[in-house]
Amino acid sequence: TSSMMKRLRSCESNSKNNNNKSLSINEYFSCRETKSIPPRFKNKVLNTTGELVAMNNRAFELIAGDGFINFTQTIFDAGQLLNSQNIDVSDLLPHPTTVSVSFCGISLHFLNEKLQLYVFILGCYPYDRENQNANQIRQFVDAKLLEYDLILDNNKFVVTDNENKMKSCFKESCTRIGCSIHYMNKQLEHCFTSDTLEKIPVNCDLVQEMFDYIRKIVSHMRRTHKQSKLPRKLQSYSDTRFNGAFRTMNVFLTVFDDLACVLDRTFLDDYTLIEKDLLEYVCSFLAPFEEAIEELSCDKRPTIYKVLPLRQYLINQCKIHADDHDGIRQIKNFISTRFQDVWVLQDIHYITTLLHPSFKNFDVNPNLQDKVINLVKNEIIKRQPSTSVLSKCFDLPKNDLKLSLNPYQELDEYMNLNVQINEVDDILLFWLTQKSKFPTLFSIVRDYDAVPASNTTVERLFSSSKYTVSDKLLLKTFDKKSVIEATATDTKRKITDPDKKSTDMSLQNQKQFRTSTTAKKLKKDEEDDIVIWDDDVQDKENDEF
């Protein structure tokens, strides 16, 4: 009897360990026969799909996308494994606030011997590390660069945003340059949205109160679809858009008088509290900041030399006048103080500014000229040939760049050079013509002017993806008459000259390619973006790209 009791207890424990279910042959081998789906299930899926696109305001092409098919297959596979359990699908789906993917964009900038600027976007990679601490981010970036046989060292510059984790990430084996646009935009954001900053009051109450009223009205107009009655579409505020407060207020100002006839009584009270004169002053004051952002975001020409003059110009714009509105005085005090304390300039900003003929006299801030000249002299000394005994035995270099016995002679001649360059002229073309006259300064320009002032090159990747998705969701309008005329013209060409069919198709494909690669307007994204500049990568150009 005791043996039978032990046997029963053993069987019960084995049954519990098997999860109350024995594996079938189908768990190991899939059935080769293709079973047809019953029509009632297909109709049910069809009706549910129609409800999906109607209730969520999505395009019908959504169900044909690879992402949706992969998502549906994953849910279907999970349902097969959990078919014996009563599970609500809402418990299986993640919360919207937890659905996120971090990306890391990396681009490469460098100048060759002919001072031709090359910009390569290495990629926009999904960040797949366990966390986003400094060590993990640096290992991720180094791994992606190693795929192109690129390694960071002290001769490389890295341009990133100014978050603490990015500062810590690139504090070694490279020279980190803070993105100038991020410096500027962050202070403008605090000016209109923050009450305190580093435990110190922002003291911009007047403009913040006005901005809050504007945001409420804009949100109401867009939510109730009343903006169709306005001559221009209102712009919602987004803290991920550079100078977003200016864009929201500037559009609001253009339709300010039209809003009185559209708003209902509830929001009309907020509208009457907005002082139009103050709104005009604020938009006028912020306009130069918008122009500076556009200047620093260019990736076709060097921009690093523009940082110091534009920063000083914006600080000078914050000078308080006797007739300034109290709200403008608050903005000027905050922006001027924060720019001087937070927007830090590095040696590369000073040196590249001096090496621009139109900025070398430092009229924007004469007190800096002596400091910058000393920085350039130190850089010149670093580039002088070695004076060791062994180096004196080396063969003379066979090139046309003859170094002067006086290392500072180039700098003196350059400072006495009477040349002015307009804003539309190419600074690289100027230095290419002066290569033989100023060989050492030319080498400095080649190493430093490739560094961008901001990391907006990789941020355009996020804007482009957003616009691509939006374009797919929008209905495309067309002119019926022009389409009929174009179709008739194409038909006549095919009839009269059938041999040109392949040529026409080739031209059409080229046109589609050009259209698909059109650049979109700049917009900032929250993800970590990195711009890598390499002064030695030109030797690998033919092998890697």
Image (tube, rainbow, N blue to C red):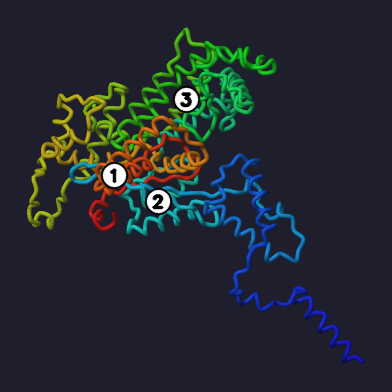
Q: Which of these two is toward me, 264 or 130?
A: 264
> In the rendered structure, which disc, 3 or 2, sits on the residue that comes first in sequence?
2
Q: Are marks 3 and 1 in contact (CB under 8 Å)?
A: no
Res 196 quadrant in image = top right
Mark closer to the observer (3, 2): 2
Q: Tag 2: residue type? A: Gly
Judged left or right of residue 328, residue 174 is left
Q: Which residue ends up furthest to the right in the rendered image?
A: 1
Judged left or right of residue 496, residue 24 is right
SS type, badge 1:
helix
Quick check: 214 above or below 30?
above
Q: Which residue is mark 2?
A: 123
As drawn, the label of residue 504 is 1
In which quadrant of the rendered image does the N terminus lie? bottom right
Q: Tag 1: residue type? A: Asp
Q: Residue at x 33, y 26 (%)?
A: 309
> In the rendered structure, which disc, 2 or 1, sits on the residue that comes first in sequence?
2
Quick check: 270 above or below 405?
above
Other-residue count near label 1 (Cα within 10 Å), few / some / many at <14 / 14–19 / ≥20: some
Other-residue count near label 3 (Cα within 10 Å), few / some / many at <14 / 14–19 / ≥20: some
As drawn, the label of residue 116 is none
As drawn, the label of residue 337 is 3
Q: Tag 3: residue type? A: Thr
SS type, badge 2:
strand
In which quadrant of the rendered image does the C terminus lie? bottom left
Q: Percent from the top left, x then y, of residue 405?
A: 10, 41
Res 78 quadrant in image = bottom right
